[in-house]
Image (tube, rainbow, N blue to C red):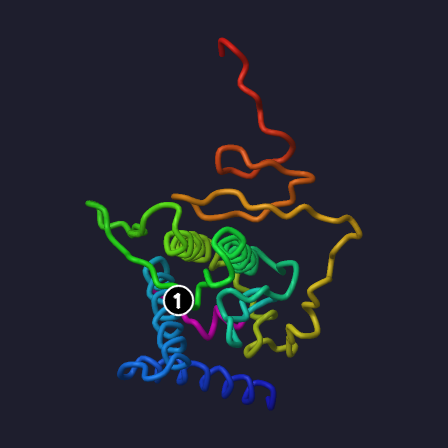
Amino acid sequence: MLKFLMSSLAFGQMLMRQRDSLDGEPDTETESIRFVGARRWNQLLHLMVRFNPEFDEKKYFSYGCNCQFFGDRPMSGPGGGPPMDPLDRTCREYRNCQKCTRMEFGDECRGEFVRYSERQDEQGNFKCGDEAGTCARAICECDLRFAKNHAEKKESYNEEIHSFYSPSNFDDRVYCPANRGKSNRVADRQCCGGNTKPFLLYDANVKSCCDGVVQDGQCEIPQPGR
């Protein structure tokens, strides 16, 4: 019970700081960073609700090993290790996508710092509005895939691995060490995608990036005349 109250208080304080940052205009460089971060947080939340009208940030963003959206890098932080279920996996893929944006565009290309443009097509579908091959476009594509995939996997939600609601007192600091499930093999981490597609982080020792799609083995080489 004490853990629930302390965690709930911490979560509430985080949301209050983020939303208070939206009042007025920033006066200093530090306030400017917080201002942008708060607006980016709301930008992500609006997209999550667009694809899942029942989205609840306290329910879904305090979950598993990788859906723990806390700290000063709630979106671009590394996560807590191997995912525990399909819903947790969507958060892991989101964090890996953000890692690729930094690998491609530099450390300042983080979800907390960079806002993107939005537009709608003739059918009213959400589209990323920035030019392909830019940091803002890459961040947007990460958000968009995450919102879609998270909504598709929402039925995987398992209260047993929720930081507040778990009847067995789930604690990600205990159950999610970053090295859990890792082998001794050294992975060759590379990024696939970009431009008009979200990035995917993959191990080039066992997979390949073929026309923006990650697949097992080597890419098929087109044969002459086929």
The residue depicted at 39 percent of the width and 70 percent of the height is 41
Amino acid type at image mark 1: Phe
42 or 57: which is nearer to us?
42
For the point 50% across and 88% down, the residue is 9
Taking depth in this image into account, of 46 and 136 the one nearest to the observer is 136
Residue at mark 1: 55
Location of residue 170 (image quadrant): bottom right
Q: Could you tell me which residue is drawn at 77 percent across and 48 percent down?
A: 185
The one of 38 and 53 positioned closer to us in this rendering? 38
Residue 58 lies in the magenta-colored region: yes
Residue 127 in the image, given as x and y percentages of width and height: 30, 50
Position of 202 relative to 38 (above/below): above
Q: Is residue 94 magenta?
A: no
Q: Residue furthest right?
A: 184
Which of 139 and 154 lies nearest the eye of the viewer?
139
**Label 1 environment density (alpha carbons within 10 Å; few <14, some 14–19, many ≥20):** some
- Residue 144: horizontal and vertical position, in percent? 39, 54
Q: Position of residue 105 (x, y in %)?
A: 47, 54
Q: Is residue 182 left or right of residue 119?
A: right
How many numbered marks appear? Answer: 1
- Residue 18 found in image quarter: bottom left
Q: Is residue 210 above or below residue 41?
A: above
Which quadrant holds residue 89?
bottom right
Q: Residue furthest front?
A: 29
Residue found 36% across the figure and 83% down from its top: 28
Q: Is residue 212 left or right of residue 167?
A: left
Q: Quadrant of the N terminus?
A: bottom right
The image shows residue 86 at horizontal and vertical percentages of 56, 55
Residue stretch in magenta: 53-62
SS category of the residue bearing label 1: loop
